[in-house]
Image: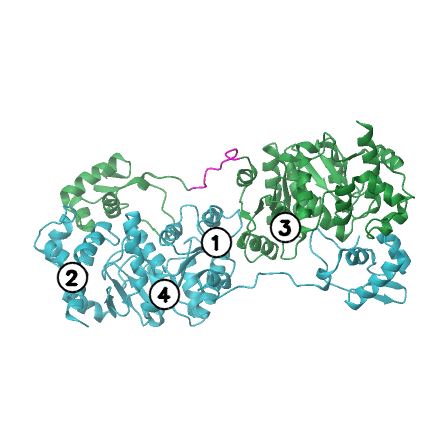
Chain colours: A green, B cyan
Amino acid sequence: MSDSLDAERLARVALCRLAEPGDPRLAGLVAELGAQRVHEHLSSERDLKGVLSDVAARLGAVDPGRELDQAARSGLRYLIPGDMEWPTRMGDLARSVAIQGRGGPPLGLWVRGPANLAELDAGVAIVGSRSATTYGVDVAAELGASIASSGRPVVSGAAFGIDQAAHRGALAVRGSTIAVLACGADRSYPSAHQGLLKHIAESGAVVSEVAPGGAPTKLRFLARNRLIAALARGTIIVEAALRSGALNTANWSLGLNRPVMGIPGPITSATSQGVHELLRTGGASLVTRGADALEVVGAVGEHLVEPARGEVRASDRLSLRERQVLDAVPVVRGAAADSIARTAGIGLVEVRSTLTRLATAGLAEFADTGWRLTSEPPGDDHAPGVA
Amino acid sequence: MSDSLDAERLARVALCRLAEPGDPRLAGLVAELGAQRVHEHLSSERDLKGVLSDVAARLGAVDPGRELDQAARSGLRYLIPGDMEWPTRMGDLARSVAIQGRGGPPLGLWVRGPANLAELDAGVAIVGSRSATTYGVDVAAELGASIASSGRPVVSGAAFGIDQAAHRGALAVRGSTIAVLACGADRSYPSAHQGLLKHIAESGAVVSEVAPGGAPTKLRFLARNRLIAALARGTIIVEAALRSGALNTANWSLGLNRPVMGIPGPITSATSQGVHELLRTGGASLVTRGADALEVVGAVGEHLVEPARGEVRASDRLSLRERQVLDAVPVVRGAAADSIARTAGIGLVEVRSTLTRLATAGLAEFADTGWRLTSEPPGDDHAPGVA
């Protein structure tokens, strides 16, 4: 690792300790001057553009070298741009802040766990309501397992409900999963998920831009959502009420030009309303299974999904005339060809030849009493069987 | 009524008795030569283009004048193009048959009931699975009531499940509803819906292109679906399995360039799979309530729907700095401004002025023990309250 990268890392550790995640002003200054120069300026209490007086005032008390050592003892590493493991997709946040004036790339990422974040390029985020229904939880677990089985990491926020289920689904198939936290990556939030986060840190990674020990706050949850969106190639919303934070993640994803996908649910379920609104207004595309989502996030042609169809039946390929005759063939007790001809309103000669073709296709048979249908699964709605 | 229109009507009554609904060959001949000339040719057993030998052979036995008289005694009238009451949207089927080589406009429509079919222009079709779930049935009834309450007729097929619920929903609010049948408009199919059809015929209309007395057949159900699509301004699919006939109605609607709408449901429900596939592949737009559908079928700007949103809160309009301070204000026991300043990592002077602004906005208050949050509904997922 080069000295300059180390110096840059120390500067970012110090700034990250004092600045709020996703602060666009700091992101702007760092992009313009570099973290080291921003750090130097602020350390000598030269306020930059008058916006960082509180950061500057407290910077003297921070020892970034000691922070890094302490973090390493908790199993944390600090990644910054330029590191081999740095997820390059984070760069999209810089473009996004330039356009939208919010967010901005993180100064760095605290990481706990063996996963290589550079491989997150292929990841899919699954997020949703904390107050999920059993339907949502089941679907999220299934999706998590399906995405992880395809070899792609599942990114989520370790929250109650959908997030937890998505992580668990990935872990259940021994897949890779990444938890992005709004508190320090050494902490467990919610505390009930201590075991889950330990599990994730053993096989995947727990990630945060907040300095170790940092508490989760509303703002940090919103900032964390942008990281989930930025780390993944696309985001699936499983359940979300109209005010759900999951919609915030969806908006970040849309702002980054990454696909947003929604799992529909009953229109009577409040926890699906936010998803339906996303789908209805065109922000998200509807998916019903992992394979659909892989098609959306995959490279062109990588995961093409065969459209879901009912079974194809021999009767699907009939001509109009063959259908008319088939319609007139009774189900149970056979009928003579001339009776069928009368019912169908078609001449006897044509009916005879058509019946022979239908028999060849396995759709009609001549039994002792005459012609009748062979058994076939009944047609669904709006086209009941022969009346 | 002009003599020529009467002669045309008699010719169409006769042809309709013998030809299958939606037969594109007959529709083509009638469009080219007029119904009277086609009738004359076939009556004199001059086969036209070799395709109508069976019709021609039986045409002599039909007495269209008597048919009309008998039908009138059953309360049926026969509408044909040129009648004041003829629904002009049917003309789209002629364009459609020219492009797609299937379907074609009906020779005429047998109608039972007081509704004026010319006013169907505003109608919305609601169709779906016969083997509907209670969810689907409830949704269809609600939708039927909502569409009918807006003054638009509800068009459906009187089948079990979704169709029945849609009609009933419209009837429940004394709205107009139209049942399009695959059998003669004097018959009740399914027979269990005799009461429902009687009800519809008293206030709306029962419609069919099949001659009175005609039995429903598979082909006639498929042909009937095209009439539902052609009569309505747009079609809503409530529940449909992957092979559902409701998808056939949806395809007709798309072929006619009419909007198709789908009601989502649980992805675990087989009866929603067909709808989800329609929504996923872009054929249909997602709607969750009558108002959404009215927006889709309405004239531009006629029924614009306010996007569904959660409640707007005072905290939605805060600056970043105000949010940071608010995040540091405790929920229950008040804290002094300098304690809040430390938690927030912001200078005391700025925190004091910000707290005053937050108090003005009703978000924070100074109680005996210090500053605390005023009560506010808790934020949903991914952005929990202050930790």
Q: Which chain carries label 1?
A: B
Q: What percent of the width, then of the height, locates residue B252?
A: 36, 52
Name which residue type carries label 2: Ala
Please tell me whether mark 3 sits on a helix, a strand or a loop: helix
Q: What percent of the width, then of the height, locates residue A94?
A: 69, 43
- Residue ID for mark 1: B285
- Residue ID for mark 3: A251
Mark 1 or 3: in front is 3
Q: Mark 2 lies on which chain?
A: B
- Real-space Cα distance between discs 3 and 4? 39 Å
* A81 lies above or below B62: above
Q: Is A305 within the magenta? A: yes
- Residue ID for mark 2: B11
Between residue B340 and residue B375, name the one nearer to us: B340
* A7 lies above or below B121: above
Mark 3 or 4: in front is 3
Image position of A154 (left or right of A342): right
Q: Which of marks 1 and 4 is nearer the N terminus?
A: 4
Name which residue type carries label 4: Asp
Are discs 3 and 2 both within one chain?
Answer: no
Between residue A363 and residue B22, name the one nearer to us: B22
Asked if the residues shown at circle 1 and circle 4 are in contact, with their CB atoms under 8 angstroms apart, the answer is no
Name which residue type carries label 3: Asn
Mark 2 or 1: in front is 1
The quadrant holding residue A75 is top right
Between residue A16 and residue B278, name the one nearer to us: A16
* B318 lies above or below A6: below
Image position of A98 (left or right of B168): right
Query: Residue drawn 28% across and 55% down?
Result: B94
- Real-space Cα distance between discs 1 and 4? 21 Å
Asked if the residues shown at circle 3 and circle 4 are in contact, with their CB atoms under 8 angstroms apart, the answer is no
Residues packed near mark 3 inside 10 Å, few (<14), some (14 to 19) or many (20 plus): many
